[in-house]
Amino acid sequence: MLHMGWSVIYRAVQCPLIRAISFGQSLHQRGMTTLPPRPKPPSESDCCNSGCDLCVKDIHEQELKIWENECNNILLGQAPKSSLTPDTYTKCRLLDIKSVNHNTSVYTFDSLGYVEIKPGQHLILRELIEGISVTRQYTPIAVPNPQELTFKVLIKHYINGCITSHIKTKWQVGDEVEWRGPHGMFLHSPNKYMKYIMLAAGTGIAPMINVCKDIVRDDGDITTLRLLYACKTYEDILLSYDLKQVASHWNFTYKTFLSQEKEVEKKRSYGENLVSGKITKDDIDLELINPLSTRVLICGTREFNSAMIDHCNQLNIQTEHIFKF
Ligand SMILES: Cc1cc2nc3c(=O)[nH]c(=O)nc-3n(C[C@H](O)[C@H](O)[C@H](O)COP(=O)(O)OP(=O)(O)OC[C@H]3O[C@@H](n4cnc5c(N)ncnc54)[C@H](O)[C@@H]3O)c2cc1C
């Protein structure tokens, strides 16, 4: 959210988040932008405290959302268009590398302007490794927006992985890396289904988190979201901060399945919904309210995906209600 008090001029240079970006095209570089004034909040005496259907405080919340959209539209109109496209590779500069656990890191890239990457869509990376051109897909966990013209990918490194071992040993901040996209056919229609059962393993959380954030942000969308997340150990749980944030919304809950964790009981005492073992057919069955108004989303390894599809078939969930990322 933008914070600018009563001033109509937003000085992006004052935003520490944006100042921290050394290479990305930021608002700072785009200069000063004239934005509409932030709506004035009601004073305590403006509220009659008689439980009106639409209280002055609710109206203020609505005004804030409208104002944010107006600001975003103005900033979007002024943002340069990114040269990232589905069919040609664009060199994007690597701005930051953050290790998140023993085998996974988040990489932040300059998106070179604004490009819409819809929830669940992915990008294709191309690397030249020992003279051979290698491509792999990655799903951004953060996409370009009017305030930040960058994207972030969460990448798990495999010891014998062709691209991921190269990434781990070779990539450095400042490098230029070739990407194209976005790609991907996932479409969400608000309120078409009553419930999404989301089955994710490891980095398969990447598309799920964006889909969840998009749905909970929309007050008019009452789709309930239930994530069953499979990881090996407690340390392998990814994006737990984001998961907890999304779980503060009424329509999202999640349960984490740890297949190789020896201290599940101890970890569970930290207040998380953790269970031992893998996701079974019965776990999915428990979540099914009505197979026709439930959609199942799946993202994980090849083995995980085929095990989950087998479970769904045994539960007579029709193929048209299953989406595999
Ligand atoms: C649409 C899509 C989106 C994706 N998004 C992401 C993402 O956001 N983040 C991410 O980290 N990956 C993602 N992947 C997987 C990614 O594209 C690569 O397959 C992965 O990074 C491994 O590439 P590699 O060249 O290092 O391994 P490879 O050389 O292809 O494989 C070498 C060995 O590594 C191991 N391995 C490789 N991939 C897996 C796996 N998925 N599970 C278990 N073992 C494996 C296997 O032992 C394999 O034999 C996505 C895949 C798809 C299809």
Image: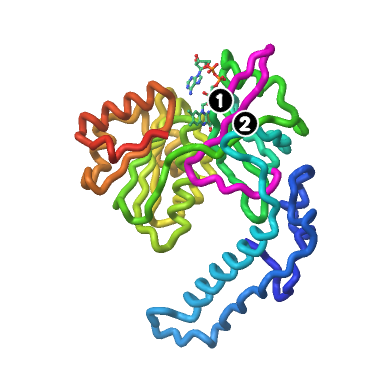
Q: Residue at x 43, y 53 (%)?
A: 215
Asked if the magenta segment contains residue 255, the reply would be no
- The verdict on label 1 being within 8 Å of ligand 1 is yes
Position of residue 285 in the picture relative to residue 251 (left or right): left
Q: What secondary structure is marked by label 2?
A: strand
Give the residue type that dot 1 points to: Arg
Which sits earlier in the primary sequence, circle 2 or circle 1? 2
Viewer-nearest of discs 2 and 1: 1
Residue type indicated by callout 2: Ser
Q: Which residue position is annotated with label 1?
A: 136
Instruction: Identify the residue shown where x is 45% and y is 48%.
Output: 212
Q: Position of residue 109 (x, y in %)?
A: 68, 38
Looking at the rendering, the stretch of residues picked out in magenta corresponds to 112-135
Q: Position of residue 178 (x, y in %)?
A: 67, 30
Q: Quadrant of residue 241?
A: top right
Q: Quadrant of the C terminus?
A: top left
Front-most of residues 292 and 195: 292
Q: Residues within 10 Å of mark 2 (few under 14, many from 20)?
A: some
Determine whether 141 is above or below 276 in the image: below
Residue that appears at 39% across and 57% down: 250
